[in-house]
Image (cartoon, rainbow, N blue to C red):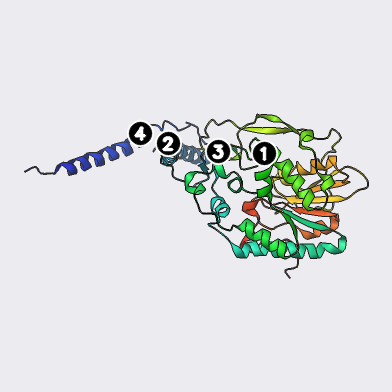
Amino acid sequence: MPLLSRHRRYLGLLFVGILAVLLLGNIVPDPLGRGIWRTKGSAPANVWQQITGTLQSAGLYLQDNFGFRASLPILRRDLREALGSPNDRNIYVGRTGRLLWGRENTPEQSSGALVRAHAVERFVEMAEILQRELKPLGTKVVVAIPPNTQSVDLDALPAWQKDFQPRPTEYDLMLAGLKAGGITTVDLRAVLKAAPFDGPRYLRTDSHWTNASSVYAFNATMVAAGHPDWQINPADVLGPLAPTPGGDLTKTMRMPPDMPDANYGLRFSPTAPAETRSPALKLTHEHPTFQPYVQHYADSGPRVLVIGDSFTAHIWTQFFAFTPVGEAAWMHFSRRTLGHCGFDVADIKAYKPDLVILARTERFFPCLGGAWPYNLPKQ
């Protein structure tokens, strides 16, 4: 009788193989390691700092380039993709090869699997109080929330997400609450689904919409605001679909795939003024790209303030060059990129706009964590 049954011998060989791989990982460089030494930017002040700095760099080099530290995450990503399993990290892949953002509960939010009713109701309450506070200034508030990719490009969703039964979402709850509170809003999900162009609504390697979607969303917002004459002709501002570099989704990946992407070019008015700072808009943002600014078109005419994020920054204000608006301003919805409901109402009152557009993207619009705008009463 053999000392070990056959299956145990196989298990033993497998165990020995695993130990051998782990051993090799400690002595053979990772094939996906970059072989880069991490060093401090400043020179050591003395010999002791030089010695400790060298030892630390050596430890980091071994950590980065041995033990399959670089290869295992890539293997995991490719294995999950081959199995058609959703990635629980930053990115997952849709049916058409489109990259989709997986953080900030975006898939669950768009499918209705997650509804944070209290945070959405807090946003609605915020919009109602903001309209009440600005009404004495003659300011109108319009809410136009740029949707997640998953809320619009339904055909691009992977099977595990596309086959979810439709259910009410936070976006639906928000629209119903604003309507009940008498706040003007527009469903940009429906606008983009029905927009009369055949190209992509969202970028393939980016979480943002294409420039064509931005134009049609802008026009729908102007109609909702009661200014249909402020719409712009897409043919006047949109160029042809052209290749564009990889977007923010690929930048979050250690080894991004070589995926083509394309966007529509934009042609702004040649007389569009430069962006300048306004002394009224004082609240600064943590990121230099998202500092508040104004574009002055004429000494007379309405003032518009867009309170948004990267979906509207440096673009929507330029669209007003084709309208009778005298000045258009932009500021971020929060002082933090990942923040919620964090703008300053004192700045709005100091700027005295005729129209305020709340345009925070869908995944960040709920007032989470008790967030509330500065200098806005809570009832």
Q: Callout 1: helix, strand or loop?
A: loop
- Look at mark 1 in the image and give the residue it sits on: 210
Q: Is residue 233 left or right of residue 1?
A: right
Among the two numbered marks 1 and 2 on one chain, the one whose residue lies closer to the N terminus: 2
Look at 84% across and 37% down and name the residue there. Answer: 272
Residue 263, picture quadrant: top right
In this rendering, which labeled residue sits more in front, label 3 or label 4? 3
Residue at the left extreme? Answer: 1
Q: How crowded is the residue under tag 1: few (<14 C-alpha within 10 Å), some, or many (20+)?
A: many
| Nearer to us in this view, 111 or 292 | 111
Q: Is residue 49 left or right of residue 245?
A: left
- Look at mark 4 in the image and give the residue it sits on: 27
Please state which amino acid type lies under the numbered disc 2. Answer: Ser
Look at 53% across and 39% down and name the residue there. Answer: 253
Q: Locate the C terminus by quadrant.
A: bottom right
Q: Locate the N terminus by quadrant.
A: top left
Whether residues under marks 4 and 1 lie with C-beta atoms below 8 angstroms apart, the answer is: no
